[in-house]
Amino acid sequence: MAKKPVKSNPPVLGIDIGGTGIKSAPVDIEKGVLVGERYRVDTPHPATPKSMLAAIGGIIEHWNWNGPLGCGFPGVMKSGEVYTAANLSKKWIGVNITDEIEKISPCKAVVINDADSAGLAEMKFGVGEEYNRHGGGVVLMVTLGTGVGTALFVDGHLVRNTELGHIEIDGEDAEKRAAEIHREIEGLSWKKWGKRVNKYLQHVERLLSPDLIIIGGGVSKKSDKFFPYIKIRAEVVPAKLLNDAGIVGAALATEL
Ligand code: BGC
């Protein structure tokens, strides 16, 4: 019998747009790995559509890219339109970022929420793999960075744009206490910040009873420093793809 040809898909450029940096790399979306050295630029400030689109255009040029492209964006997104932008210029609201990227590049673009994209990567290639099926239960990915992002999966299906980073705890936006950037800004010890994260996760657990919580964002590689303060019933694990989850997941958005 003739051998089946091995299908090798062309890579997808993944762009992880954050409040602090914009990271990118071509991704093999079958294997979930970067196939080029990651390229990062600082998020311009003020983070307006004009300045950020110029930065995104520069990234596309850096890669000399004209193939498919997927992005994670730190706000609520519907069909490419930005609904919220908590840590960026409010001028983003109402902009269709997909259309704008397609105007400044030859690429076909798909843009989804950044936590949703990081979650897709962890469910397909990371610690969420065994939950990524019918009957797999409830998985919540929580990214701790400039903001607090969440991605909710029920039996492997993504419930998009959950925004549980903005639930109110003690009358305050949870993100303003638990985001990693506040540990830095306020000079908090790992213990103090870890207890804030714990309070946040306990609250979320009361609402959703997840089976698994995946902690993502750059700080996930320092989980040993703050996981000891997390005391909840659900299993809590650091993201396996660590900081690459954002880029890999951004590329996976093209598969939705
Ligand atoms: C935004 C979310 C985003 C998260 C992480 C929050 O402030 O509202 O959409 O996923 O930050 O970037």
Image (tube, rainbow, N blue to C red):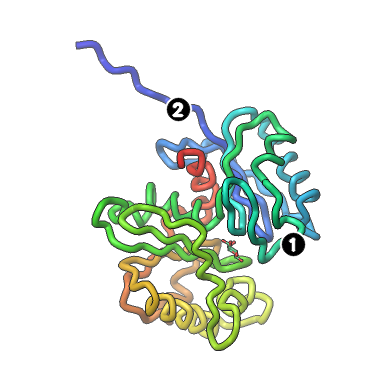
Left or right of 61 on screen, residue 179: left
* Residue 51 higher or lower than 210, as above or below: above
* Residue 72 higher or lower than 19, as above or below: above
Question: Mark 2 or mark 1, which has the lower sequence index?
Answer: 2
- Graded by Cα atoms within 10 Å as few (under 14), some (14 to 19) or many (20 or more), the crowding at tag 1 reads some
Residue at image coords 49%, 48%: 249
In the picture of the structure, the residue carrying the numbered disc 1 is 90
For the question of whether residue 153 can be seen, the reply is yes
What amino acid is at disc 2? Asn
Q: Residue furthest top?
A: 2
Asked whether the residues under the numbered discs 2 and 1 touch, taking CB atoms below 8 Å apart as contact, a structural biologist would say no
Q: Say which element carries label 1.
A: helix
Residue 88: image quadrant is bottom right
Q: Position of residue 215 (x, y in %)?
A: 45, 65
Residue at image coords 40%, 38%: 31
Residue 208: image quadrant is bottom left
Q: Position of residue 15 (x, y in %)?
A: 61, 45
Q: Which mark is residue 9?
A: 2
What amino acid is at disc 1? Lys
Residue at image coords 25%, 52%: 134
Ligand 1 lies in which image quarter?
A: bottom right
Q: Position of residue 32 (x, y in %)?
A: 44, 42
**Which residue occupies the foreground of this view, 250 or 169?**
169
- Graded by Cα atoms within 10 Å as few (under 14), some (14 to 19) or many (20 or more), the crowding at tag 2 reads few
**Which residue occupies the foreground of this view, 91 or 140?**
91
